[in-house]
Image: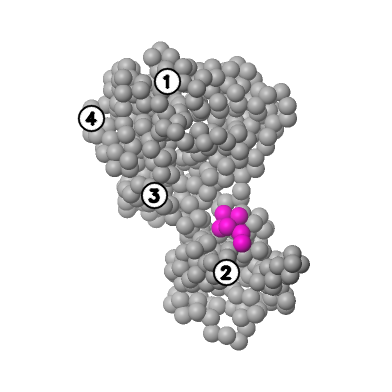
Amino acid sequence: MSGPVVVVGDTFLDRDVQGVVDRVCPDAPVPVVEEMTARARPGGAGLAALIAAHRGAEVVLVTALADDDPGRELTQLLVTAGVDIVDAGLDGPTPEKIRVRSAGQSLLRLDRGCRPSSTGPIARRGVAAIRGAGAVLAADYGRGLLGRADVQAVLTTVAARRPLVWDPHPQGARPVPGARLATPNEPEAASLSGGAPGTGLRAVTRMAGALREGWGAHAVAITLGARGALLTEGHGAPLIVPAPSVAAGDCCGAGDCFAVTAAELLASGALPSEAVSAAVATAAAFVASGGTTAPASKARPVAGPPIGALAAEELAASVRRVGGTVVAAGGCFDLIHAGHVTLLQAARRLGDCLIVCLNSDDSVRALKGADRPVVPVADRVAVLLALGCVDAVAVFDETTPAAVIGRLQPHVFAKGGDYAGTQLPEADAVAEWGGQVVVVPYLEGRSSTHLLREVGRRAR
C-alpha cells in the first residue's frame, strides 16, 4: 500500500468500567456494581484508527476534538499508539461514552456531550493527508464532520483515485459518489434504505442494491453480525461470506475492524470480494480475542492476544459460575483426522463445554520441526470451531499448554488413548486446583504424521 491509512470521522472517548455485582439495591430493583477497574480508550473513528495502528499501518486521523480533559486524554491515547492526528476543533465538549460492565455483560451506557456540535474546517495538512492516502476510511458517527462541504469535496476528489471505504450512520452524511465500498450493518442499512432488518437474505440483497445505486458506490457490503456479510457489486447474485463460529464475545468495534481491514486490502489491490472475505474473518478473530475489552499495548505494531484466548477464559469462567464442568483438550491438530474427532467428541461428553488448547505455528515448529505445521493456525482454528463438539479454541505459544490450562482451570483435561499408561506433563498443573487428567478412546492407526508420510509416498 502506497501512503498511509487515513481515517476521517467523529471520535469519542470510551470508558469501560468493570465491576462485580453481588446484590440488588434496597431502594430499587437494580444491581449494585462494585467498581473494580476503569479503562479509557478511543471510540468511533478513533477506534478505527487505533485498530489500523495496532495492525502496523501508518495512520492519520482527521477528526474534531474539543480543548478539554477528554479531548486531551484521547489525543494522548492515540498519539501513544502511533496515530497522527489532524484536529479540526469542536464547538462543544468532546463526547464520552461510559459502559458499566460485569461478568462480560454491559449493564449501562452513560453518554456525556454526545449531541452533535459544529466543527472547524480541516487544516491543509488534513487535506494533504487525504489526497496522499493509500486508503481512506470515512467513519461516520452522525456528528457532522463528514457532512461539511470541504470534507465532502476532498473525499469526492479522492474517491476517483484511491480506495475509499465509507462506514455510514443513519444520522450521518450521504456517502460521496464513487466510494469503492460502503459498509453499513443490517440495522443501519434498513434505516438508510427504508427496509426492515431481520427479514432474510432476499430483503438484505434488495437493501444493498438500493443503497449501491442511490449512493453511486462501486460496492456495498452489509455486515450481518454472527452471520457474516453480504456483498453486492452489480445486478448479479450477491456474495455471502459466512462468519467463522466464535465463542460469545464483545462485538463492540467489530464493524470498525471490518472496515479498516477492507480498506487496507483494497489499497493493496484486492478485489472487493477478497477484501470482504478477509474482513469478515478478521472481525470474527477480533471478537474472539476479546475485542475492545482486551488489554491494549502501547507498542506499535501491537501483537494481539493469542487467538481465542480471552473468549475461552470468559467461557470457562461463565461455566464455573453456574456450577458446570469445564473440559479442555490439547494438541497441534495439524491435518485433523477421524482420531482427533473421536477424541474431541468423547471429551465434550465429559462436561458442559469443551475448550481446545491449540499449539501456535511457532509451538508446532519447536515440537515437530521446521516443515510443520502443514496447516496454519488460523485454518486449524477454523476447522476445530466447525466441529459441533468444540465450544472454544485457545492458542498458546509455549511447547506445553500448562500456562493456558492454568488460566482456564478446567475440571477435566482429556488426552487421547495413545497416551494411556504414560505420565502426562499436564497432570501436575491440573492437580493444583483439584482437576483431573483423563485418557479417552482414540482410533488406532490415525496420525497426522502417518498421513503426511503416505501423501509423500504416493507423490513419489
Check residue 146 in the rendering and tell me which mark sits there, or answer none: 1
Residue 316 image offset from top left, x and y in percent: 51, 62
Amino acid type at mark 4: Asp
* Among numbered discs 2 and 1, the one appearing first in the sequence: 1
Instruction: Please give left or right for residue 73 compared with residue 140 in the image.
Output: left
> Image point 54% across, 64% down: which residue?
358
| Whole-number angstrom distance, CA of label 3 to CA of label 2 | 27 Å
User: Does the CB distance between marks 4 and 1 fall below 8 Å?
Assistant: no
Q: Is residue 332 above or below residue 138?
A: below
The local secondary structure at tag 3 comes to loop
Residue occupied by mark 3: 302
Residue occupied by mark 4: 68
Residue occupied by mark 2: 331
Instruction: Please name whichever residue, 147 or 189, is drawn nearer the observer in this view of the structure.
Output: 147
* Among numbered discs 1 and 3, the one appearing first in the sequence: 1
> Image point 49% across, 63% down: which residue?
362
* Among numbered discs 4 and 1, the one appearing first in the sequence: 4
Instruction: Please name whichever residue, 445 or 267, is drawn nearer the observer in this view of the structure.
Output: 267
| Whole-number angstrom distance, CA of label 2 to CA of label 1 | 49 Å
Label 1 vs label 3, nearer the camera = 3
Amino acid type at mark 3: Val
Amino acid type at mark 2: Gly
Is there any visible trace of residue 321 in the rendered image? no
Q: Quadrant of residue 324?
A: bottom right
User: Does the CB distance between marks 3 and 4 fall below 8 Å?
Assistant: no
Residue 185 image offset from top left, x and y in percent: 56, 32
Q: Residues within 10 Å of mark 1 (few under 14, many from 20)?
A: many
Label 3 vs label 4, nearer the camera = 3
